[in-house]
Image: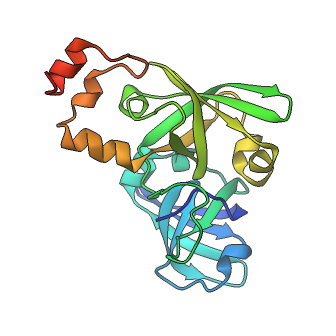
């Protein structure tokens, strides 16, 4: 588990293709402290397992399923990546509970500034948007953020200067892809309700039909 509080910006040293999968080598410094083979590291929000490491790098294997569901397919050598070590039970939970299991990707369709804030508009599939809730939590490229707007086709987040400066999100532009992990609580609620939440609109209100569909009347 992670918190969505990025610890360091790493750099992709090399990408070794292996018939649908890849092996990543990431240059870094901070997260190497106490690192062991088998540790979990969030790379742009994706939970990867350390297979080897050296003085200023670590390596991880990426499965074909992860390649299909995340933005790693468009990653290139020298690209910057958000890095976070897994959560210790003694740590403060500064963000929210993030599993590192990406639900899918979104596309940044707008980037605007408002005083000291940077607004990002992200379009995504309905399978993701149904879990996006106003003032709820979402992780973009492993960064814990608060949803400031949501409708049936997109959602918006606002970055403070610190977040824009210490994560890759501040460098993103219109058309860029981001990894999206929805709040795990919403996904469990949807599962317990038999997936019925998928039939509701993201911006829909409370109606008699909705109550009937979910067994309240």
User: Farthest residue toward the front?
Assistant: 217
Q: Position of residue 162 (x, y in %)?
A: 79, 50
Q: Position of residue 209 (x, y in %)?
A: 21, 13
Q: Position of residue 53 (x, y in %)?
A: 60, 81
User: Farthest residue toward the top?
Assistant: 208
The answer to which quarter of the image holds residue 208 is top left
In the depicted structure, whether residue 169 falls above or below residue 82: above
Does residue 148 appear left or right of residue 19 in this picture? right
Q: Quadrant of the C terminus?
A: top left
Residue located at (81% from left, 44% from top): 161
In the depicted structure, whether residue 202 falls above or below residue 100: above
Q: What colouring method underlies this structural image?
A: rainbow
Does residue 75 appear left or right of residue 116 in this picture? left
Residue located at (66% from left, 74% from top): 31
The answer to which quarter of the image holds residue 156 is top right
Residue located at (49% from left, 38% from top): 105
Q: 74 or 175: which is nearer to us?
A: 175
User: Farthest residue toward the right?
Assistant: 115
Residue located at (72% from left, 78% from top): 56
Does residue 215 appear left or right of residue 34 in this picture? left
In the depicted structure, whether residue 78 falls above or below residue 1: above
Q: Position of residue 71 (x, y in %)?
A: 53, 45
How many marks are shown on the rendered structure? 0
């Amino acid at each position: 588990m992670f918190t969505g509080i990025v610890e360091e910006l790493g750099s992709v040293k090399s990408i070794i293709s292996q018939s649908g999968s890849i092996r990543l080598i990431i240059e870094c410094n901070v997260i190497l402290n106490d690192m062991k083979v088998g540790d979990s590291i969030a790379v742009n929000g994706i939970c990867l397992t350390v297979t080897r490491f050296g003085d200023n790098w670590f390596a991880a294997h990426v499965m074909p399923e992860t390649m299909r569901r995340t933005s790693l397919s468009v990653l290139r050598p020298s690209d910057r990546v958000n890095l976070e070590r897994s959560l210790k039970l003694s740590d403060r939970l500064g963000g929210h509970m993030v599993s590192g299991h990406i639900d899918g990707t979104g596309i940044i369709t707008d980037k605007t500034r408002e005083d000291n804030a940077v607004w990002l508009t992200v379009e995504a599939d309905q399978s993701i948007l149904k879990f996006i809730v106003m003032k709820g939590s979402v992780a973009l490229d492993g960064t814990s953020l608060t949803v400031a707007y949501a409708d049936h086709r997109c959602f918006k987040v606002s970055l403070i200067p610190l977040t824009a400066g210490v994560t890759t999100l501040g460098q993103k532009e219109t058309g860029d892809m981001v990894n999206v992990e929805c709040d795990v609580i919403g996904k469990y609620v949807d599962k317990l309700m038999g997936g019925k939440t998928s039939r509701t609109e993201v911006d829909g209100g409370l109606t008699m039909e909705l109550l009937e569909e979910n067994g309240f009347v």
